[in-house]
Amino acid sequence: MTDPYVTCPTFENDRYLLRPVEPADVFDLLGVYSDEKAVPLFNSDNCHGDDFHYTTQERMQSAVDFWMEAYREKWFVRWVIVDQKDRKAVGTIELFNRQAQDYFNDCGLLRLDLRSDYENTAAVHDILSLIVPPAYDLFHCKMIATKVIPSAAPRREAVEKLGFAATQEALVGHDGTRYTDYYVKTQG
């Protein structure tokens, strides 16, 4: 499989398209990141205090610019999730190979941010089924981890259907903070 930092792949099924984030996505993504029902489900662990609640076009533009810079610097890949029916961005997925001194070393860390009306088992399953299988090869890892907070029952059901299991292991942040509520899936 190709290096995603050289040529970023796209993925699609009849319902969703995952493609690299672009500057033109700002307007649609503002609807995601200003969605107060959605924000608590986003994984902001170890993100230097950013809670990903953006309420202005300028702040959303700044985030998109940063995500594009992060891609160029090979820190992570951020895909936009497009609903094929109306061709609108309804969320993003971030993925990278995490190098650390904890259980989540050499792990594909996946962050899924969805507009609240897409936060249901079927949508989460359909979206993650596009990215999880190729993620092991793309990011040279044997484990994928994603955060699922206890109140996110539809998300939990979707990741469990995909073979993820809860772990009691904590992700240790750059400042020593311990983050929990992770689900993992090993390649196999």
Image (tube, helix red, strand yellow):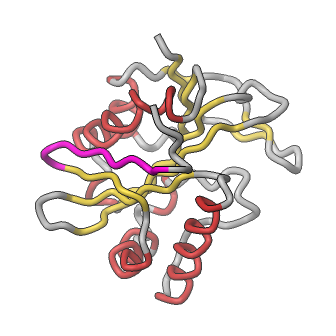
SS assignment for the magenta stretch, majority = loop
Nearest the camera: 156 or 56? 56
Residue 71 image offset from top left, x and y in percent: 59, 59
Does 103 sit left or right of 19 as displayed?
A: right
Residue at 33% of width from left, 75% of height from top? Answer: 28
**Residue lying farthest to the top in this orientation:** 188
Is residue 53 one of those drawn in magenta?
no
Residue at 57% of width from left, 34% of height from top? Answer: 139
Residue 81 drawn above or below residue 22:
above
Residue 79, quarter of picture = bottom left
Residue 176, quarter of picture = top right
Residue 132 drawn above or below residue 65:
above
Does 13 sit left or right of 140 as displayed?
A: left
How many marks overall?
Answer: 0
Residue 103 drawn above or below residue 172:
above
Nearest the camera: 166 or 26? 26
Nearest the camera: 75 or 146? 75
Residue 142 image offset from top left, x and y in percent: 58, 20
Does 65 sit left or right of 134 as displayed?
A: right
Nearest the camera: 65 or 186? 65
Residue 86 image offset from top left, x and y in percent: 14, 67
Q: Quadrant of the N terminus?
A: top left
Residue 98, quarter of picture = top right
Residue at 51% of width from left, 82% of height from top? Answer: 61
Residue 82 image offset from top left, x and y in percent: 27, 60
Residue at 67% of width from left, 67% of height from top? Answer: 50
Magenta stretch in the rendered image: 7-15
**Residue lying farthest to the right in this orientation:** 175
Is residue 12 one of those drawn in magenta?
yes
